[in-house]
Image (tube, rainbow, N blue to C red):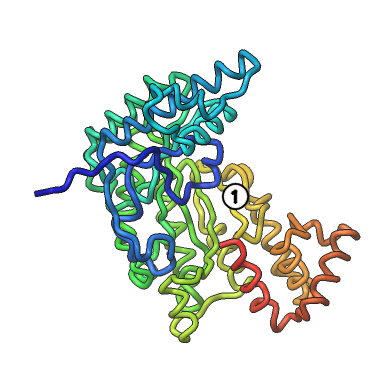
């Protein structure tokens, strides 16, 4: 007999996209149902579960209750005490402080967007997703955007009609971790999907009228599959034409199987220059798609790869070309400076103050054109 799960209060998962920084996070599932990708350590050792629908709806009601109280307090020029919060729940229960803080942040950011957690929330029954969407729109009429992560494998199995109904109920953006369009890379990192399914899923999302954000992971193929990784990913994206393409350069977090493979010599990780060459090849192979490309993560070397494709094509490509034409010592200076926030853009090499700070740091680290990739690897660990 299946044990009934007790409600233990408002929940939030561990991650969300940087673009969802202002969103209310509603946890529908816990962890990742696939959890085999070798480049990811986030959910390793954790068990996937679906939260009961009534728990999710209760979370929404709790946030709504606290949000109304926060708004009323602001109008009256007062602050909410712990006792005030307890009275909101009839005085019988302790206040749900996690929900209160989430509601306060939600109100402060205009109550405009919600993000579904965790890694693949669209795996639950489409009817339940639609019930959650309707409940959210009723609780928060000011909502403009509701988004979720999803795996291509999951999307490919959802009917076009169910996706259309989700869109009609308020789901207007889906984030998919494509990572690569190369079947050999996808197999190597145990992504659990192939290029053809990535394309099918992306096209289904677009057909439903839902905005699509696809993620590309430069460096994931290593030295051996770099060219194929760039070209095949560009080809897949050309066939999908997503609304957004977001870059997430490969990092090797502690606990990821790929990190162990690298340490054992079974994965040839690329350095900064080789990864830049791969990025340039990828950009040169993108076709006439209409996508917004975002380099909105600290792991990415080039902040300049940010704009509308193809209108901003040259603006995005030129800095990468210029970097690859620099002497090795200048490449080292930029990479160290960028990774330590001395530089934001390639043009900062020409800023005397920023340049001097980066040079001083390189000297203190003992950085040379021969060893700086290893130094950067240790620096990047702070961001993972």
With respect to residue 80, does 347 lie above or below? below
Closer to us: 329 or 114:
114
- Decide: few, some or many residues near mark 1? Use Cα within 10 Å; few <14, some 14-19, many ≥20: some
With respect to residue 21, does 232 lie above or below? below
Q: Residue at the spot x=29%, y=55% of the render?
A: 48
Q: Residue at the spot x=16%, y=47% of the render?
A: 3
Q: Residue at the spot x=59%, y=42% of the render?
A: 308
Closer to us: 324 or 102:
102
Looking at the image, the residue that sits furthest to the bottom is 265
**35 on left or right of 52:** right
The percent position of residue 57, horizontal first and vertical second, equals 32, 30
**305 on left or right of 201:** right
Residue receiving disc 1: 296
> Quick check: can you spot residue 375?
yes
> Number of callouts in the render?
1
Closer to us: 173 or 86:
86
Q: Residue at the spot x=62%, y=48% of the render?
A: 306
Displayed quadrant of residue 368: bottom right
Q: Image quadrant for the C terminus?
A: bottom right
Looking at the image, the residue that sits furthest to the top is 76
Closer to us: 8 or 227:
8
With respect to residue 46, does 74 lie above or below? above
The percent position of residue 213, horizontal first and vertical second, equals 45, 45
Q: Secondary structure at mark 1?
A: loop
The percent position of residue 227, horizontal first and vertical second, equals 49, 71
């Amino acid at each position: 007999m299946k044990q009934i799960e007790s409600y233990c209060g408002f929940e939030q998962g561990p991650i969300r996209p940087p673009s969802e920084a202002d969103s209310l996070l509603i946890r529908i599932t816990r962890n990742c149902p696939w959890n085999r990708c070798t480049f990811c350590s986030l959910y390793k050792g954790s068990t996937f579960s679906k939260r009961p629908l009534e728990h999710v709806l209760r979370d929404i009601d709790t946030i709504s209750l606290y949000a109304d109280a926060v708004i009323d307090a602001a109008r009256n020029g007062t602050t909410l005490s712990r006792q005030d919060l307890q009275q909101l729940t009839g005085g019988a229960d302790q206040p749900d402080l996690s929900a209160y803080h989430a509601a306060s942040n939600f109100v402060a950011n205009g109550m405009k967007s919600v993000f579904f957690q965790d890694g693949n929330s669209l795996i639950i029954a489409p009817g339940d997703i639609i019930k959650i969407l309707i409940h959210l729109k009723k609780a928060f009429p000011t909502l403009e955007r509701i988004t979720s992560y999803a795996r291509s494998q999951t999307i490919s199995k959802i009917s076009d009609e169910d996706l259309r109904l989700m869109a009609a109920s308020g789901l207007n953006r889906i984030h998919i971790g494509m990572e690569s369009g190369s079947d050999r890379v996808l197999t190597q990192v145990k992504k659990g999907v192939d290029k053809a399914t990535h394309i099918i899923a992306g096209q289904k999302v677009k057909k439903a009228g839902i905005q699509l954000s696809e993620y590309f992971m430069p460096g994931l193929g290593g030295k051996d599959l770099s060219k194929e990784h760039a070209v095949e990913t560009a080809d897949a994206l050309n066939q999908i034409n997503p609304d957004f393409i977001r870059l997430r350069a490969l990092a090797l977090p502690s606990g990821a199987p790929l990190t162990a493979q690298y340490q054992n010599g079974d994965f040839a990780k690329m350095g900064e220059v080789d990864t830049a060459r791969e990025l340039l090849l990828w950009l040169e192979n993108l076709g006439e798609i209409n996508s917004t490309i975002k380099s909105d993560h600290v792991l990415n070397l080039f902040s300049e790869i940010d704009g509308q494709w193809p209108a901003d094509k040259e603006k995005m490509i030129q800095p990468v070309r210029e970097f690859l034409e620099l002497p090795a010592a200048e490449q080292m200076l930029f990479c160290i400076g960028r990774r330590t926030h001395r530089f934001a853009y390639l043009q900062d090499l020409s800023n005397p103050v920023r340049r001097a700070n980066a040079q001083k740091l390189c000297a203190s680290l003992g950085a040379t054109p021969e060893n700086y990739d290893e130094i950067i690897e240790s620096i990047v660990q702070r961001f993972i």
